[in-house]
Image (spheres, helix red, strand yellow):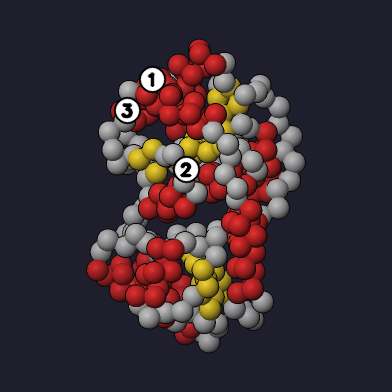
C-alpha cells in the first residue's frame, strides 16, 4: 500500500522540453489522488509554461499536492501567483554528499557538460569546439566531456570529442560519484543545471551555458559570467577569453546554497 507519492527532483511541470510533460505528471497526481494517496511536490522547478493549457494543468496538479517545495525564486513566484504556499530552498543536489570518483586525467582539466537541444545549434557546437581547441593550444587544458544522460548526451559528446584531439569522455551512473568527479576538475562549462551545481559545490569554477531560465537564474543568483544559447555564438577567440577569465576568477561562496538545500528534507518527514 502506497503511503505517499513524491513528484519532484527537477523541472517536471514545464513544456519547454516536451508539451507532454504537464499531461504526464498531472496524470500521475490525478491517479494518486483518485486512490486516496497523498502527493508531495518536492524540490520542484515550475516552468517555463508557454501554453495556456500547460499552465492550467500544472496549477491543477499542484493544487492537489499536500506538500510543496520549490528550488528557485521564479517557481516560488509562480506558485504564489496561483495562491499556493510552498517552501523555497536551493536545489537538493547542493546538499548531496559526494563520493570519491576513481578517475585520473591531466590537469588543468575543464569538464564540458552539454545536452542535445535545439538551441545548441551547429554554429554553437562549432564555436565551442574551436574555442576548446584554441584553449588546448594556448594553455594545455585537458577537455573532459561528461554526458549526464549517456543515451542522449553521450551521442553528442562522442560527436564533439572526435573534433577535439586528446579530449576524453567520462560517464558515471552513481549520482554521488558523479558529483565527486567534479572535485577532480578545475572548471566546468555546463548546460545542465545539475552539472553547474555539482561543479560549484565541489569547488570548481563554472561557466553556465544557458538554454533554460533555471540555468540563467543560477548564474544571476551567484553573479556568474555565463553564455546564452538564445544569442548568436561569439567568435572562438572571444569565447575562449570568457572561459579564461572565468578560470582566473575566484570560486563563489556556495555555503548558503549547500546549507539551505537541507530544508527540502523537512517536506519528506
Identify the secondary structure beneath mark 1: helix
Q: Is residue 155 visible?
A: no
Q: Nearer the viewer, residue 40 or 1?
A: 40
Q: Nearer the viewer, residue 25 or 127?
A: 127
Q: Is residue 243 visible?
A: yes
Q: In the rendered view, would you say 36 is above or below 10?
A: below
Residue at the image position 60 percent from the left and 68 percent from the top? 264
Distance Cα–Cα, label 1 vs label 3: 8 Å
- Circle 3 residues within 10 Å: few <14, some 14–19, many ≥20: some
Where in the figure is residue 165, as x and y percent of width and height?
Answer: 52, 16
- Circle 2 residues within 10 Å: few <14, some 14–19, many ≥20: some
Q: In the rendered view, would you say 165 is above or below 158?
A: above
- Judged from this view, the residue extending furthest toward the left is 52
Residue 78 vs residue 2: left or right? left
Mark linked to residue 224: 2
Residue at the image position 50 percent from the left and 13 percent from the top? 138
Residue occupied by mark 3: 234
Distance Cα–Cα, label 2 vs label 3: 18 Å
Q: Which image quarter: residue 260? A: bottom right
Distance Cα–Cα, label 1 vs label 2: 20 Å
Residue at the image position 48 percent from the left and 29 percent from the top? 245
Residue occupied by mark 1: 237
Where in the figure is residue 150, as x and y percent of width and height?
Answer: 53, 40
Amino acid at each position: 500500500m502506497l503511503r505517499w507519492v513524491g513528484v519532484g527532483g527537477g523541472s517536471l511541470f514545464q513544456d519547454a522540453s516536451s508539451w507532454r510533460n504537464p499531461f504526464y505528471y498531472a496524470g500521475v497526481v490525478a491517479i494518486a489522488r483518485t486512490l486516496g494517496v497523498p502527493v508531495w511536490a518536492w524540490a520542484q522547478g515550475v516552468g517555463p509554461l508557454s501554453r495556456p493549457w500547460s499552465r492550467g494543468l500544472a496549477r491543477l496538479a499542484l493544487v492537489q499536492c499536500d506538500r510543496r517545495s520549490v528550488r528557485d525564486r521564479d517557481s516560488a513566484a509562480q506558485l504564489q501567483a496561483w495562491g499556493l504556499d510552498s517552501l523555497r530552498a536551493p536545489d537538493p543536489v547542493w546538499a548531496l554528499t559526494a563520493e570519491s570518483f576513481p578517475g585520473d586525467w591531466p590537469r588543468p582539466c575543464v569538464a564540458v557538460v552539454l545536452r542535445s537541444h535545439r538551441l545548441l545549434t551547429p554554429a554553437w557546437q562549432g564555436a565551442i569546439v574551436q574555442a576548446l581547441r584554441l584553449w588546448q593550444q594556448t594553455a594545455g587544458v585537458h577537455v573532459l566531456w561528461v554526458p549526464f544522460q549517456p543515451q542522449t548526451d553521450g551521442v553528442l559528446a562522442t560527436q564533439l570529442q572526435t573534433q577535439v584531439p586528446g579530449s576524453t569522455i567520462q560517464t558515471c551512473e552513481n549520482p554521488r560519484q558523479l558529483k565527486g568527479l567534479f572535485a577532480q576538475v578545475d572548471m566546468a562549462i555546463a548546460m545542465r543545471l545539475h552539472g553547474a551545481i555539482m561543479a560549484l559545490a565541489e569547488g570548481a569554477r563554472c561557466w553556465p551555458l544557458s538554454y533554460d531560465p533555471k540555468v540563467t537564474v543560477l548564474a544571476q543568483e551567484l553573479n556568474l559570467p555565463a553564455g546564452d544559447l538564445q544569442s548568436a555564438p561569439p567568435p572562438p577567440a572571444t569565447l575562449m577569453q570568457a572561459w579564461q577569465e572565468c578560470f582566473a576568477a575566484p570560486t563563489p561562496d556556495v555555503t548558503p546554497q549547500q546549507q539551505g538545500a537541507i530544508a527540502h528534507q523537512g517536506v519528506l518527514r
